[in-house]
Image (cartoon, grey):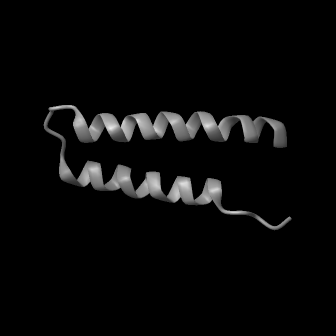
Amino acid sequence: MKSAWTNLKPFITVIMTLTLVALLFVPITINKEVLMLFSSSYGAMITYFFTEHKE
């Protein structure tokens, strides 16, 4: 399971980063609350992924 988890982290990080860049730079109208919610969840996920966990 640990092997699958370490392979999943980079995939989720890249997908969420590309999504955030697309939301910020694509010229479409996006609800501000949706953008803030996505940005907050992005920050939380990145913080969780890159925080060293003591086992």
What number of labels is visible? 0
Q: Is residue 1 visible?
A: no
Eyeballing the image, is 50 above or below 27?
A: below
Q: Is residue 5 left or right of residue 20?
A: right
Give the camera-side residue of 36 and 18.
Answer: 18
Residue drawn 15% across the image and 32% down it: 27
Q: Quadrant of the N terminus?
A: top right
Place of residue 28 in the rendered image (x, y in percent of width and height, measured from the top left): 15, 32
Query: In x, y percent, where is residue 4?
Result: 78, 35
Percent of width and height locating residue 39: 36, 53
Q: Is residue 33 left or right of residue 45?
A: left
Q: Quadrant of the C terminus?
A: bottom right
Compared with 44, 22 (above or below) is above
Q: Is residue 20 left or right of residue 8?
A: left
Q: Position of residue 53 (x, y in %)?
A: 76, 64
Quarter of the figure with residue 33: bottom left
Q: Residue at x 65, y 41 (%)?
A: 9
Q: Image point 44% across, 40% down: which residue?
A: 17
Residue at horizontal 67%, vertical 36%? 8
Answer yes or no: is residue 2 visible. Answer: yes
